[in-house]
Amino acid sequence: MNRLAEVAAVAALSASTLACSAGMNSHESRPRPSEWSVTVPPAEAKIPTTSTTRVGESYLKLLQSNATLNVIYVPTTETTSPEDATLFEKEIAKADQLIQQEPLFMLQTASHVQEATHGRYNPAAITVSITPTLDTGKDCLDSKDIPQSKMIRKHAEPQTDKNALNVIIVKQLGCDDVMVGGYSNEGLIPILTSRAFKDLGRTSMHELGHSAGLLHANLATCPEPNLPLAKDCKSAEADDPNSIMGYSDDKGSEDFSLPEMHRLGLLDVTEVIKNPDSGEYTLSDIEADRGEAKVLLLDDTYFSWERDLQAPRDAKCTEVTDESSPYPPDMILTTSKKRADGTYRTLRCTAVNKRFATSSLQVRRDLGVKGMGLIMRPDRAPDDGEPELSNGEVINDTVVYESATVKVTYLGQNENNQARVRVENLKKSR
Ligand SMILES: [Zn+2]
């Protein structure tokens, strides 16, 4: 059974490359003060696994060294267009929480920053500074207006700390889209709109991801039947549901995917299996000890065992013919589907990932200028549309990658909640 077609469901979301919707941060803040402390963590030796020098390199080093997060607030003379006034008033009302460093707001921000990096970036402190009032030349922030961006960064320069991760938040909304949370580009200090007050921690980390060189996280569609090379894949913009670099706000994207963690230099060398010999390997999730492998990397393709944010929807459905069931009631969703003739049939759906795992093996590929593409999650049912009729089995022994030289098979999950994968080096065995 070939399930690769399942990855084909894509939703094209419009967004310019670097102007970032705040929609991804639509979750209500969930403060977890007890999980955060301002103390600097022990100086743990972090060995970056990325070695290429690039513009965003300094950002990687700052993340790895738990640098201070320095938030620079820029009040403006211009406010906003009358039609956006209501939203604007609502957003800037929260500015006081930042300016006064209201404890709950600061804790929420810190908590969300930590969550975004799975606890790997713990800012030594979050500092707040305010610039003099600025005339941005417009009544909104225009990500395409380079002179305006330059002026804002120049204006904030005295408050900029070169030993910190700086973000600038301006008292204005976006021009193209009032929902835009901010924009940035590799090597540049993010500019956030007042919309970012909604979730300063996550919006900052999304934009700092850009500053460090990450692009939006896409859902890639690749031709059938074999898993192709990256050049054969197309990708919808920013629709990887499991990444903070995506826009799938209804699915709870709050953190970086493991491949992105690797790109940010936040995984240790021991956590990455790179172009290995033939053999069986286990991949642990991000919560496991740092000595355990988290990512299998074959050239530009990443395999990782990650929390599956759509697990509750991961249902296998059968038509109800018999009321008895081998599954406990909380795993069963009974649903009705309308037939073409207008009548209904009743389906009983079992959340397979909920039962067997809350994680799935996820395959992502570096699609170059298109960002990081999520290629597949082989043990999953389709995300959208008609639930597939099957008996609810977990799909093990699925070939998840095949090239001229390497074949990777997902063998299933072991008793330690790790993914088992088999790598076959075809070149060597022939
Ligand atoms: Zn973005």
Image (cartoon, rainbow, N blue to C red):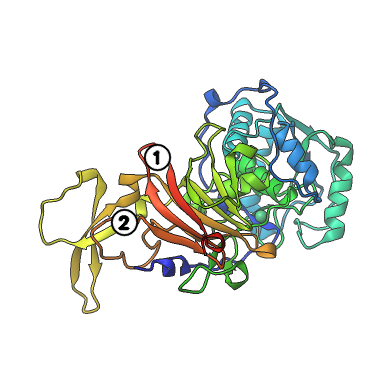
Identified by mark 1, the residue type is: Asn
The mark lying in front, picked from 1 and 2, is 1
Which residue appears at 67% of the width and 26% of the height?
44
The reply to whether residue 102 is in sight is: yes
Q: Name above or below for residue 150 compared with residue 169.
A: below
The reply to whether residue 91 is in sight is: no
Point out which mark residue 260 bears: none
Q: Name above or below for residue 219 compared with residue 45.
A: below
Q: Which residue is mark 2?
A: 315
Quarter of the render that holds ligand 1: bottom right
Q: What SS does tag 2 mark?
A: strand
Q: Which residue is mark 1?
A: 417
Which residue appears at 75% of the width and 49% of the height?
211
Locate residue 123: give its quadrant. Answer: top right
Give residue 352's position: percent from left, percent from top. Answer: 31, 51
Give residue 371's position: percent from left, percent from top. Answer: 65, 60
